[in-house]
Image (cartoon, helix red, strand yellow):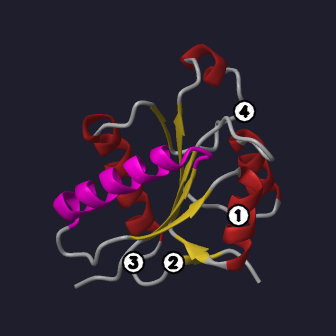
Amino acid sequence: MERAFRFLIVDDERINRVVLEGAVRQLSRVMQPHRAPPDIEMAEDGLAALNALRAGSFDGVFMDLMMPVMDGATAIKTMHAEGMRLPIIVVTAMDPAAVRRLPLHTVLSIVFKPISSARLEPPLSLLFDTITAKSSTSPIRLGG
């Protein structure tokens, strides 16, 4: 069995983190049956996400945009300023017109809430393809 992908889910609402985790796990089993189940870590705001990313190795990030302490757009901008080049899927309830005005040109995909397997499957497939193309043996090391 191939190694598990390691993801960081960032959302200030616990229920959204749990729903997204369940959908990612379910789709991973179907889309990547040859791979160990994903290792998923959670963060509740952009600052906590940056701390987790600096301390660990991840293959991809699922990032909400509207959060207290530090919003997702600021966290993404900081990630890039610090040289963190990870595939990011934005998961948001923001109005699509408002999202288009944000500087999110570096994200892999945007998924609008509510989360469903149907909405998540195409971006997750793209994420798997992107990770596999970058490295098939080890996660991307970001921190320390």
Q: Quadrant of residue 117?
A: top left
Name the residue located 77 percent from the left edge and 84 percent from the top edge: 144
Question: Marks 2 and 3: which is nearer the front?
Answer: 2
> Which residue is tagged 2?
139
- Per the rendering, the mark at residue 136 is 3
- Label 4 is placed on what type of residue? Pro
Give the vertical position of 77 relative to 135 (above or below). above
Label 2, label 3: how many angstroms apart (C-alpha)? 8 Å
Q: How crowded is mark 4: few (under 14 residues within 10 Å), some or many (20 or more)?
A: few
- Label 1 is placed on what type of residue? Met
Name the residue located 67 percent from the left edge and 35 percent from the top edge: 66
| Main SS of residues in magenta | helix
Q: In which quarter of the image is residue 82?
A: bottom right
Q: In which quarter of the image is residue 28?
A: bottom left
Quadrant of the frame with the N terminus: bottom left
- Per the rendering, the mark at residue 103 is 4
- What segment carries the magenta color? 11-32
Give the vertical position of 4 relative to 94 (above or below). below
The reply to whether dot 2 and dot 3 touch (C-beta < 8 Å) is no
The reply to whether dot 1 and dot 4 touch (C-beta < 8 Å) is no
Measuring from the top left, give residue 85's x and y in whole percent: 65, 61
Q: How crowded is mark 1: few (under 14 residues within 10 Å), some or many (20 or more)?
A: some
* Disc with the residue nearer the chain's start (2 vs 1): 1
Residue 16 in magenta stretch: yes
Q: Is residue 52 left or right of residue 1?
A: right
Q: Helix or strand or loop: what does disc 2 sit on?
A: loop
Q: Helix or strand or loop: what does disc 1 sit on?
A: loop
Name the residue located 71 percent from the left edge and 48 percent from the top edge: 76
> Which residue is tagged 1?
84
Q: Helix or strand or loop: what does disc 4 sit on?
A: loop
Label 2, label 4: how many angstroms apart (C-alpha)? 26 Å
Measuring from the top left, give residue 33's x and y in whole percent: 17, 69
